[in-house]
Image (spheres, grey):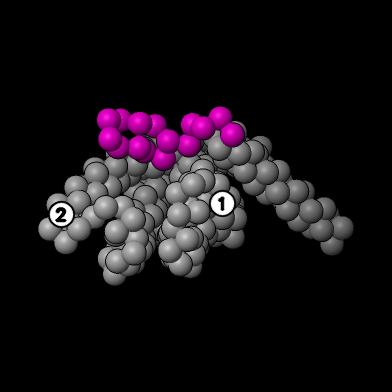
Amino acid sequence: MDNKRNSRAIRSRTLMLAQLGILIGVMMVFHLTGITTIAIGPIHMTIMWVPIIIGAILLGPAAGAILGAVFGISVLMNMGLITQLLLGVNAPLTIIFMVVIRGIGVGFISGLIYKGFEKLDKKEVWSYEATGLLTSLLNTFMFVAGTAMLFGGNEALLELAYIDDSSRGAVFGALFAIVWAQALIEAAVCTLVAATIARVLKTHILKTGQ
């Protein structure tokens, strides 16, 4: 009996690692092909949160955190020269918070959110969609908070971006309008696409006896 139990545990861990590897692979394909975002006018909607949410739902908070870290590192690499300029005005910790720590934290919390909803939604009618929606909104909130930390009191960075006192309000107003418009689109994608894929995959896994 113990041998069978150990064998099932090993198969379960192997399957989990394989699934995590596949999701990381998907994210790397997105990164390498440059399709991490979809441009809709001035709005750039990221699709990288879809595999993160799927992983958080299927594999748990730890997997969500790992996938979130992959997302953060990918964003950091894509920033290129912008990152160097920001680091040049002594904002490395804020940048790391905005892209890496944010990714890890949101991915981990996404898994916790699903675990909490799973206990309430026994028939799994709405827990997937609610997890996708709240994960997307949490990501946007942390991004806005990071942006405020980065630009709000950093005069050197404001001067670098040619933002003076008279235009600061208009610039931030336009920025946050774009961010929240993007957030609504991303929330819809995370709520519908990520939730649907996660539900289909989990149903398949349960049918195969895993």
Image disc number at residue 185: none
How far from the left and from the top, in percent, is residue 183?
Answer: 30, 46
Q: Image check: 194 left or right of 9?
A: left
Quadrant of image for the N terminus: bottom right
Q: Residue furthest left?
A: 166
The residue at 48%/36% (across/down) is 36
Q: Nearer the viewer, residue 31 or 78?
A: 78
Q: Which residues are magenta?
A: 32-46
Q: Nearer the viewer, residue 94 or 191?
A: 94
> Label 2 sits on what residue type?
Ser
In the image, residue 83 sits, relative to residue 187, either above or below, namely below
Which residue does the numbered mark 2 point to in the structure image?
Answer: 167
How far from the left and from the top, in percent, is residue 190?
Answer: 39, 42
Q: Earlier in the sequence, mark 1 or mark 2?
A: 1
In the image, residue 31 sits, relative to residue 75, either above or below, namely above
The residue at 26%/52% (across/down) is 162
How far from the left and from the top, in percent, is residue 52?
Answer: 51, 47
Among the 4 quarters of the image, the one containing residue 138: bottom left
Quadrant of image for the C terminus: top right
The residue at 82%/53% (across/down) is 7
Q: Are marks 1 and 2 in contact (CB under 8 Å)?
A: no
Q: Residues within 10 Å of mark 2 (few under 14, many from 20)?
A: few
Tell me if residue 96 is in the magenta stretch. no
In the image, residue 31 sits, relative to residue 104, either above or below, namely above
Say which of marks 1 and 2 sits in front.
Answer: 2
The residue at 32%/67% (across/down) is 154
Q: Is residue 164 visible?
A: yes
Q: Which element is circle 1 on?
A: helix
Q: Residue furthest right?
A: 3
Tell me if residue 37 is in the magenta stretch. yes
Q: Which element is circle 2 on?
A: helix
Which residue does the numbered mark 1 point to in the structure image?
Answer: 73
